[in-house]
Image: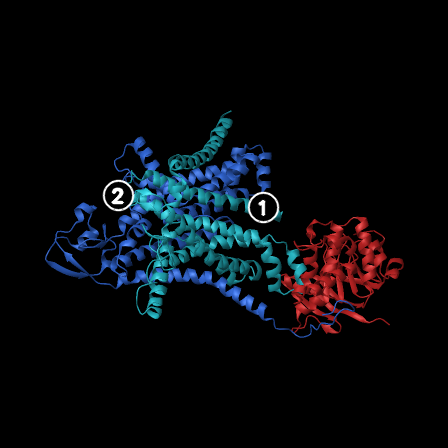
Amino acid sequence: MNNSGEPGKISFATKKFRFSDWFAERFIKVVAFMSIAFVALIFIFVFREAFPVFRMDVIQKVGSENLVQERYGEEPLTPATANPVSGSDIKVSKPSSTLLARVWMPVSDNPRYGLIPLFLGTLKVTLIALLFAAPIAILAAIYTSMFAKPRIREVIKPVIELLAGFPSVVIGFFALMVLATVFQDIFGYASRLNSFVGGFAMSLAAIPVIYTITEDALTAVPKTYIEASLGLGASRRQTAFNVVLPAAAPGIFAAVILGLGRIFGETMIALMATGNAALTSINPFESVRTLSATIGAEMAEVVFGDTHYSVLFLIGSLLFIFTFILNAVSEFYFKNLVIRRYQSKK
Amino acid sequence: MENLKVRAINLSLFYGDNQALKNISLDIPEKRVTALIGPSGCGKSTFLRTLNRMNDLIDNVRIEGEVLIDGVNIYDRDIDVVNLRKKIGMIFQKSNPFAKSVYENIAFGPRINGITQKSRLDEIVEFSLKQAAIWDEMQGRLHNSALSLSGGQQQRICIARSLAVNPEIILMDEPASALDPISTGKIEELIHDLKQKYTIIIVTHNMQQAARTSDLTAFFYLGELVEINKTEIIFSNPGKKQTEDYISGRFG
Amino acid sequence: MNRNRKDIIIESLTGISVLLIIFIIVSILAITIKGGWPNLTWKFLSEFPRDGMTKGGIFPAIVGTAFMTLIMTIAAVPFGVITALYLAEYAKENSVFAKTIRFAVKTLAVVPSIIFGLFGLGFFIGFIGQNMDKIFNGGVLKWGQPSILWASLTMALLTLPVVIVSVEEAIRTIPVEMREASLALGATKWQTIKRVVLPGSVTGILTGTILAISRGAGEVAPILFTGAAYYLADLPHSLSDQFMSLGYHIYIMSTQSSNVDATLPIQFATTLVLLLLTFSLNAVAVVLRYRIRQKAK
C-alpha cells in the first residue's frame, strides 16, 4: 500500500479468505454453543447418577413392618417410631419401591427413601416464604414506581436491590442467630428452627427477585395509560391498582414464578433455619426438611454411587425439572424483562 | 472525456416488503463531486450506502440490480466486501471518531491493513491529516482524545481517517449537517481540494452546498431518481417539474 | 372522603412494605456489624483457626475464597465474554440457535445452586476426574475427589450467566456508528470486534467480572461437596487440594461446631467479612454499570 501518491489499486473482484475471521466466527459460535451443552450436561449427569435408583437392589432387613403397608399407611411415621425392630428375615427389594413412603430414613438398617415428607416440607416452606415475599415485594414495587418521588425512587431501588447481594449463607446465619430467637419470643413455639423461620428467611432471598421484575413490569406500562386514568379523575391509588397493575400482570406473574423458583431451590437458608427434621405436619412452627437441604446435608456423607447417593441425585433431578418448567413458564409470560434484570441472584 | 467510476443499473432495494429504492440507474464520473439531493426519506442516503454495501449490516434488506465500480458488479457473489470498502471511504452524518487519540484514529485503517512500522504510520498520519487540511491544528495534539475536539474538527479527523486507507471513492452522508457555518465552509473547501484525487459522492439536504461543491447533481424523490445532470443545469434549468419545485423550495 | 381514606391506607401500606424491606436490610447489617466488628482484627484476618476452630482467625478461608474465585473468574469470564459477543454481534435475533442459547443462559441463571453442586460431583469429579485418574494416574485417586479446581469450575458455571448478561448489555451500548466507521474503513468483522467492540466494553466486562466474583464468593451450596473443606491445616498448594471458604466456614461454625455459643464472635466476624466483601464488590459494580448506562444515553 502506498500512501504518498495516487490512490492504490485493490482488487475486490474475488473473495479473499481471511483465516482469523473465519476462525473467530466459528470459535465464538462453538463457545456460545457451550451454554446449551452445559445445560444438556447438567441434565445428563444429574439424571445419570439418579437413574440407578430404578435398577438397584438393596438388601433390607425386614422386621415386623411391611413396606406395602407403610406406603399406604395412614398414620405418619416419625423417625422415632419408624425404627425397625430387627428381624431375621432378609429381603431384597428395590429402593425405588420406598420412594413413596412417608418416611425419609436413608441411614438405617432398613433404609427408606420416602420423598413425601421432603416434598411436603418444601411445599410448606415455599408457601410461607411466598406469602411473605410476594405481597411485600409487589407492594414495595408499586410504591417505587407509582407513589415515590423520582429522587426517593433513585435511592429505594438500589437499596432494595442490595438485598440481592446478600449471600444466602448470610441470610441463613441471620435467621439462625437472630430471627429464630425473636420469633420464638413472640410466638412461644417449641422448636427454635422451623418452617416459619425458614420460610421468612427465604422470603428475604426472593423479595429482590420479585421486586425488581415487578418494578420493571410496572414501569414498562405506557405513561399514556396513567395520564389517561389520572385525567379521568381517578386517584393515584386507583390508577395504580385498576390500570397499571392489570396491565403489568403478566410481568408480575413472571416475577412471582421466578421468586418461587428461587425459594424452591434455596439450600443454605433451608439447611440453617428450618430445623431439618423430615416431619409431615401442617403446623408452621414445626421443623421441616426440604428437598434441597436434604441434598446439601447428606451428599457429603454418602458413599459414592450407592443407593442413598442416587436418591439424592433423583431429588436433584426433580428440583431441576421443576425449576426448568418454572423458567419456561415465566419465559412464556414475560420474555424480555427477565433476561435484562434477572442477573444477580437465584 | 470523463472516465466512468460508478454505475448503477436498475438498482432496487427492499426493507422487507417496503421498496426504498426503485430502479435507479445512474453514472458517476471519476474525480468529480456528485451531489445527491432530495427531501428526507427519498432514498438518497440509502442509495449512498448501497455503494459500499453498508446495507449488508441490516437484516431483512434485499437488493436487485447492479452497481458497477470500475466495471465490476459489487453485488456479485464472489465480491470481497472488505476490500471493496477499503477502496471506498465513507463519512457519516454524525462524526464518529473512535474513543482513541487522534493519531490512533488515523492509524486505525493502516493498522488493520497490517502496517505496524512506527515511521510508516507516522508518515501516513501526517499525510492524511495534511490532505484533510487539519494537520496544522492537530500537529501538537496527536495524542489527545479525538472526542475532545470540536464537531468540525472531529468530522475532518474522520475524513483524514478514511483517506489513510487510500480510497478511490469517498462517500459523504450529509457530512456537514451537524456543523456550524465556519466548519461547514472548511469541509466544503476540503471537498473541493479532494476531488483532484478522489471521486466524491455527497448526500446533502442543503441545496446551496450541492450547488457550491458539486459538478453533478442527482435529484431523488420517493425512492426514485428523478434526474441527474450537471449541477449548473439542475439549478438553473432543471428538466423535470419536481426538481424545479424542490430546488425552488416549494416542498421538502 | 371515604375514597381519600382508602387511598391513604393503601398508599401507606405500599410505603410500609418498602420500609420493612429497608428495616430488614439495616437490621442484618447492624447486627452483623455489632456482633462481628469487635473481633475483626488484623490477627483474625491473618491467623489460622486454632484449638479445634474455637479460636484464631480465618486466614485460610479468605485465601481459599480468593483462590476459588480467581480460578472461577479465569474460567467464567472468557466464556461469558465470548458468548455475549456471539449474542450481540453474530447472532441473528430470530435464529433458532440464538434463541436456544438465550434460553440455556436463562436456565443456567435459575437452576438452584445445589444442582450445580450435584453436577460438579457427578460430572467433574465422578466423570472427568475419575477418568483422568484412570488415564494419567494409573487409578491412583487424585482428581476423582473434591478439589478447589472442581469447585471453581462448578462455580464458574453458576456465574456464567451473570457475566454474559452484563457484557452483552455493555456491548449493546456501543453505538452502531462505531462499528460502521470501522467496517467502512475496510476492517473485517473480527477486526472491528477486536479493535472497537471489545475495547469499548471493558467497563462492562469488568462489571460482569465483579458481579460474578461477588456471587461466587458468597455461594456455598455448589461447593458443599465439590471441594470445600471443614478445616485444613495448610493452604491449598495445588489444584487438586481442597480449600476452606468463608461462606462454608460460616455454615459449619454455626451449625456443626461442637460449641456454637463459644464461637459466636468468630461466626459474626466471618459473616461480616463476607458481607463486606460482597457488598463492596456489588457497590463497585453498581457504580460501573451506572456509568455504562450514562454513557449510552
Residue B188 screen position, x and y as percent: 82, 56
Disc 1: which residue = C291
Q: Position of residue B212 (x, y in %)?
A: 85, 56
What type is the residue that disc 1 sits on? Arg
Q: Position of residue A62 (x, y in %)?
A: 14, 56
Mark in the foreground, 1 or 2: 2
Q: Give the left or right position of residue A304, taking residue C107 as reference.
A: left
Query: In the drawing, what numbered circle is on residue A281?
Result: none
| The image quarter in which residue A99 lies | bottom left
Q: Chain of mark 1?
A: C
Task: Tell me which residue sits at (47%, 44%) in the image.
Answer: A252
Q: Nearer the viewer, residue A16 or B140?
A: B140
- Toward the left, the furthest residue is A88
Quote the CA–CA distance across marks 1 and 2.
48 Å
Q: Which residue is mark 2?
A: C258
Asked if residue B29 is positioned above or below residue C43 in the image, the reply reads below
- Image quarter hosting the N terminus of chain A: bottom right
Question: What chain is the cyan one?
Answer: C
Q: Nearer the viewer, residue A137 or C19?
A: C19
Asked if B165 appears above or below C281 in the picture, the reply is: below
Q: Is residue B47 visible?
A: no
Quadrant of residue B93 within the rendered picture: bottom right
Q: Point out the tag, 1 or 2, that comes first from the N-terminus.
A: 2
Q: Does residue C137 appear anywhere in the picture?
A: yes
Q: Which chain is blue?
A: A
Tag 1, which secondary structure?
helix
The furthest residue to the top: C1
The amino acid type found where label 2 is placed reads: Ser
- What is the secondary structure assignment of the residue under circle 2? loop
The chain shown in red is which? B
- Crowding at mark 1 (Cα within 10 Å: few <14, some 14-19, many 20+): few
